[in-house]
């Protein structure tokens, strides 16, 4: 059995959809014999996790599964294994670094409480 990391993408549509497009990207751990089986399992998960509900503003909210744009096999599961990476380019390096430190600080505060 092999392990894969699959990125599932959902579009979030609220009300009539006249808002800035929103997409939810989820990383899921998939166990499968082959890459094709992993893709099928990931797509099945995406279909199963689609949702419709009414929000607090009485608007219909739809989580529509789009597809699995990334699927990566993990070579081993050990402490510190890289699961995913994304290279981020920005116009303001200092702002990005401050954002990363801020997000880390929020995690640290949450683990103390």
Image (tube, helix red, strand yellow):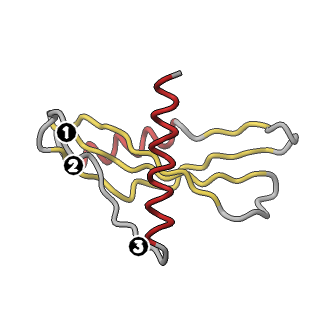
Give the residue number, with chain letter if any, for mark 1: 80
* Residue 19 percent location from the top left of the image: 76, 62
Picture quadrant where residue 53 is located: top right
Q: Which mark is residue 89?
A: 3
**Nearer mark to the viewer, of 1 and 2:** 1
The residue furthest right is 58
Q: How busy is the neighbourhood of tag 1: few (under 14 within 10 Å), some, or many (20 plus)?
A: few
Instruction: Measure the C-alpha gap from mark 2 to mark 3.
Output: 30 Å
Q: Which mark is residue 35?
A: 2
Q: Secondary structure at mark 3?
A: loop
Q: Secondary structure at mark 2?
A: helix
Disc with the residue nearer the chain's start (3 vs 1): 1
Q: How many marks do you count on the picture?
A: 3
Q: Secondary structure at mark 1?
A: loop
Position of residue 22 relative to residue 77, above or below, is: below
Left or right: where 56 falls relative to 47: right
Instruction: Measure the C-alpha gap from mark 1 to mark 2.
Output: 23 Å
Residue at (73, 45) in percent of width and height: 61
Picture quadrant where residue 33 is located: top left
Q: How busy is the neighbourhood of tag 2: few (under 14 within 10 Å), some, or many (20 plus)?
A: some
Position of residue 54 relative to residue 73, above or below, is: above
Left or right: where 26 falls relative to 35: right
* Residue 24 percent location from the top left of the image: 54, 51
């Amino acid at each position: 059995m092999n392990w894969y990391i699959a990125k599932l993408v959902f579009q979030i549509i609220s009300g009539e959809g006249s808002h800035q497009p929103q997409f939810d990207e989820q990383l899921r751990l998939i166990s499968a014999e082959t890459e094709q089986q992993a893709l099928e399992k990931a797509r099945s998960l995406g279909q199963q996790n689609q949702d419709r509900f009414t929000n607090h503003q009485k608007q219909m909210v739809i989580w529509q599964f789009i597809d699995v744009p990334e699927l990566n096999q993990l070579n081993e599961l050990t402490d510190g294994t890289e699961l995913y990476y994304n290279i981020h380019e920005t116009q303001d390096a200092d702002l990005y670094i401050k954002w990363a430190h801020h997000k880390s600080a929020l995690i640290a505060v949450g683990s103390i409480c």
